[in-house]
Image (cartoon, rainbow, N blue to C red):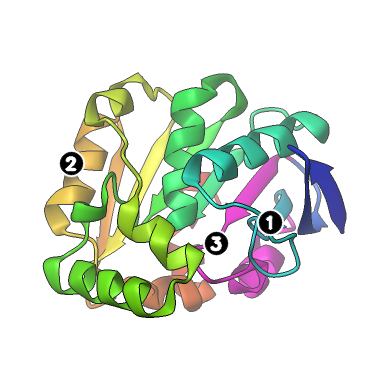
């Protein structure tokens, strides 16, 4: 399905019925990351999996976390979704945090997986590797990732919705960054998945479902 929001055309898939949940993928991915998860959630939720701008079947456009956040906010408004649950992975997790900070009235619950507040929230080898790759390829997605985000830690204290923070024990996000995000959001739950890397438990949708099901009351 296609929708024009924030002056850009986004592609999304919709499944199920019930309260809304929005799934946001990471850098260089698309909605298909959540193919199996959508079907697992569909009996309980109306599931929306969006291709971020410049990704998948959505339109090519200037990239920034601020613009991506504005896209999701406009998507919620245009479809008149009532405080959906937002599940975001990696770049999608950054957008989820920024949406909850900028538009708290639009968010019902928050699931943030493998997110960082600044580029230095990544482990040093990953940070250096991505920076070198961005210099060589000049890929706007990589350039965005090595230059942003810049989320003020204190801003997280204003997030009051139920929140689950996820990461793998072998994640490329620094452990202290994940712990800080969870500690700053009042009442947030923290779950570190043993043996998992940045995306392994996300790509294995069964593991992701098992991690989030108790939080969602399933």
Q: Position of residue 60 (x, y in %)?
A: 69, 61
Where does label 1 land, which residue? 50
SS under mark 1: strand
Q: Residue at x 44, y 26 (%)?
A: 101
Question: Is residue 24 in the magenta section?
Answer: yes
Q: Confirm or deny contact between disc 3 and disc 1 (CB under 8 A).
A: yes
SS under mark 2: helix
- Label 1 Cα neighbours within 10 Å, binned few <14 / some 14-19 / many ≥20: many
Marks 2/1: CA distance?
28 Å
Marks 2/3: CA distance?
22 Å
Q: Residue at x 23, y 61 (%)?
A: 173
Q: Residue at x 21, y 67 (%)?
A: 127
Numbered badge on residue 211: none
Where does label 3 land, which residue? 25
- Label 3 Cα neighbours within 10 Å, binned few <14 / some 14-19 / many ≥20: many
Q: Residue at x 46, y 70 (%)?
A: 202
Q: Which residues are magenta?
A: 19-43
Q: Position of residue 163 (x, y in %)?
A: 40, 38
Quarter of the picture containing the N terminus is bottom right
**Horizontal placement of 112 versus 20: left or right?**
left
Q: Position of residue 68 (x, y in %)?
A: 58, 45
Numbered badge on residue 180: 2
Q: Give the mark nearest the N terminus, 2 or 1.
A: 1
């Amino acid at each position: 399905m296609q929708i024009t929001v924030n002056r850009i055309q986004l592609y999304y898939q919709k499944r199920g019925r019930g309260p809304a949940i929005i799934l946001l993928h990471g850098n260089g991915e698309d909605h298909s990351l959540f193919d199996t998860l959508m079907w697992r959630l569909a009996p309980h939720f109306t599931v929306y999996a969006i291709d971020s701008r410049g990704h998948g079947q959505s339109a090519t456009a200037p990239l920034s976390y601020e613009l991506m956040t504005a896209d999701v906010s406009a998507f919620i408004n245009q479809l008149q979704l009532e405080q959906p649950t937002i599940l975001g992975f990696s770049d999608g997790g950054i957008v989820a945090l920024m949406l909850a900070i900028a538009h708290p009235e639009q968010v019902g619950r928050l699931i943030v997986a493998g997110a960082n507040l600044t580029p230095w929230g990544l482990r040093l080898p990953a940070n250096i590797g991505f920076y070198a790759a961005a210099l060589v390829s000049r890929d706007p997605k990589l350039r965005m990732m090595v230059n942003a985000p810049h989320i003020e830690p204190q801003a997280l204290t204003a997030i009051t919705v139920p929140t689950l923070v996820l990461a793998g024990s072998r994640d490329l996000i620094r452990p202290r960054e994940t712990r800080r995000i969870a500690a700053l959001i009042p009442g947030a739950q923290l779950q570190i998945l043993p043996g998992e890397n940045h995306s392994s438990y996300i790509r294995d949708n069964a593991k992701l479902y098992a991690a989030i099901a108790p939080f969602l009351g399933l």
